[in-house]
Amino acid sequence: SAAQLGQRKLRAAQAELAAAQELGQSRLLAAQELGQSKLTSAAELGQSKLTALKGALHYEVPDTTLFSLVGTTLNLLNGTTGPGLLALPLAFARCGWLMGTVMLLGVFALNHASLLLLLRACLTTREHSYIGLCSHVADGIASLIDWSSLLFFFGSSVSYLVIIGEAFTVLTSSLGDGSVYDGGPVSDGPLHYSLLALLLLVAFTAVCLTPLSLLRSMDALQCTSAVGMGCLFFTVAVVALTPPPPDAAAAEPLPAAIFSAEALLSLPTLAFCFSSQSLFPPALETLHQPATYAYMHRVVDTTMYVTLALHLLVGLVGSLAYGSAVRPNVLDSLPQTSVVLAARLAVVLAFAFTFPMMVFLCRMHLRAILARSELVPRATDALVEHVDAPRERVSDPFRHTAVSLLLVGSSLLCAIVFPNIDAIFGLLGGTTSVVLSFVAPAVFWEACVGYMYNWTHPRRLFCKLLLGFSACIAALSLPSVLVAVLDNLYATASWVPMASTTGTLQKWSGGLELERAVNSSAASSAAEGPMLAGATLQL
């Protein structure tokens, strides 16, 4: 009985074991199917997320072909070769051709070295604009750099309009005489622009420059860099190959060096000519990585040396040909032939493509200033995040249009009221240019890279040298520039008040009216001429 009972229990246990094995097998198959389905779902979800991430991320493969490198070089040359090129002969005439050459080479060497420091800071922080780099420095320094950038690009746009207006004045002067057709750049008249040229300048700004300045992206203007540089190369060739008129050739030769207070006015103009460091990081973004560093330096060196050659050629040829009689715009000193007129129109075409870029940069830095001041409901980080994109992202179209029209209109008004490009270059070169060319690269390198080095490292000492050189340029040149501006203002403006013997202020008709009175009186009476001439000298 016990054996039979044990046999029955054994069979029952075997049956339970078989049932448990079948149940475990079925559960294992179900778990495998469920795990396989979950794994498939997770793989599909991961693939979809990877696809979405690839679509969100944009990585541009560096293009190191010859065509791409030449295009990048032309884009940079279009920004480094600006209106300061036409004012360089006057700077050489003030300090002498040899001293001007030495000073230009010195400013170029410092600019080239500061540009390399700037690019090193950009590579360390992976930023590609001054606005992005400003997030790594103190707020006060960032505000100084933003305001300097805004004023520099705004002043550059004003100088573009002044040169365009002078070209229109020369064009209208061939149509007739009088203030309607003739103006100051050609005839030394009381008006800088002729009335017809003024109307053409306003119409050209409204019809051509304003629509281009309203563009949110500058991609459409990238193909115009080759056209603009072709126009500037043609202008340089005209300046270099056009023989001076006989009266200019008979003038006394320009000294090699001139040591005077007026020579200090050359410093800000030379500094203005190479104030283009802020244009390099965005243009070199795709090449700014260790794998393509050699190509980037090749583009930078080519751009800088070609810029130096163009400025040196125009400065030497213009100053040696016309001496102290050279005008702030060297094209005004050339014989007004059809070839020179074609060069003026080429300059108009080149600057017409560059002016919208200046407005675009003004708009970007103005938004950075407002964002930092918390006047615009947008975080600075969001601004920095999108600033390197080729398209300006502004949520309010009305604000974009209003700011663009305000910048274009105010630059046109300044070009009409204050058309002295020599004073513009002097003011910009002594203030904003030194900040953008020397102070900003040194500060960015110190904040992003220099803290890793000892204070006696040569590069840290060089940054101190850049800051000291900036202070020297501002201290030496700004007083002379301000004196020259006020002297010109009191000599020509009719609204400047003048102190009388009674201690009150009275308005006078300006130096030009008094000079005409001297000339007419000297022609009619030899006795009154010296007395009026003495009065002019006393004033």
Image (cartoon, rainbow, N blue to C red):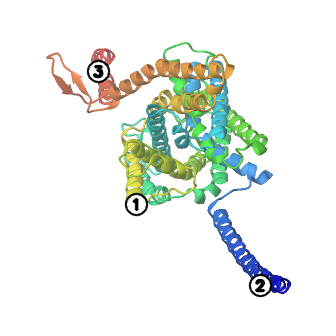
| Circles 3 and 2: CB atoms closer than 8 Å | no
Q: Disc 1 and disc 3: Cα gap in Å?
A: 68 Å
The residue lying at 72 percent from left, 76 percent from top is: 31
Secondary element under disc 2, as helix, strand or loop, is: helix
For residue 271, say whether it is visible. yes
Secondary element under disc 1, as helix, strand or loop, is: loop
Give the x, y percent position of residue 259.
Answer: 55, 12
Q: Amino acid at mark 3?
A: Ser
Kindly identify which residue carries mark 1.
Answer: 396
Q: Earlier in the sequence, mark 1 or mark 3?
A: 1
- In the rendered image, the quadrant that contains the C terminus is top left
Kindly identify which residue carries mark 3.
Answer: 525
Kindly identify which residue carries mark 2.
Answer: 19
Q: Nearer the viewer, residue 179 or 383?
A: 383
Q: Earlier in the sequence, mark 1 or mark 2?
A: 2
Q: Disc 1 and disc 2: Cα gap in Å?
A: 73 Å
The residue lying at 39 percent from left, 21 percent from top is: 483
Q: For mark 3, does the 10 Å Cα neighbourhood hold few (<14), some (14 to 19), or many (20 or more) residues?
A: few
The residue furthest front is: 1
**Is residue 472 left or right of 537 when viewed as pictured?**
right
The residue lying at 45 percent from left, 33 percent from top is: 144
1 vs 2, front mark: 2
Query: Which label number is shown at residue 408?
Result: none
1 vs 3, front mark: 1
The residue furthest left is: 502
Q: For mark 1, does the 10 Å Cα neighbourhood hold few (<14), some (14 to 19), or many (20 or more) residues?
A: few
Q: Nearer the viewer, residue 280 or 195?
A: 280
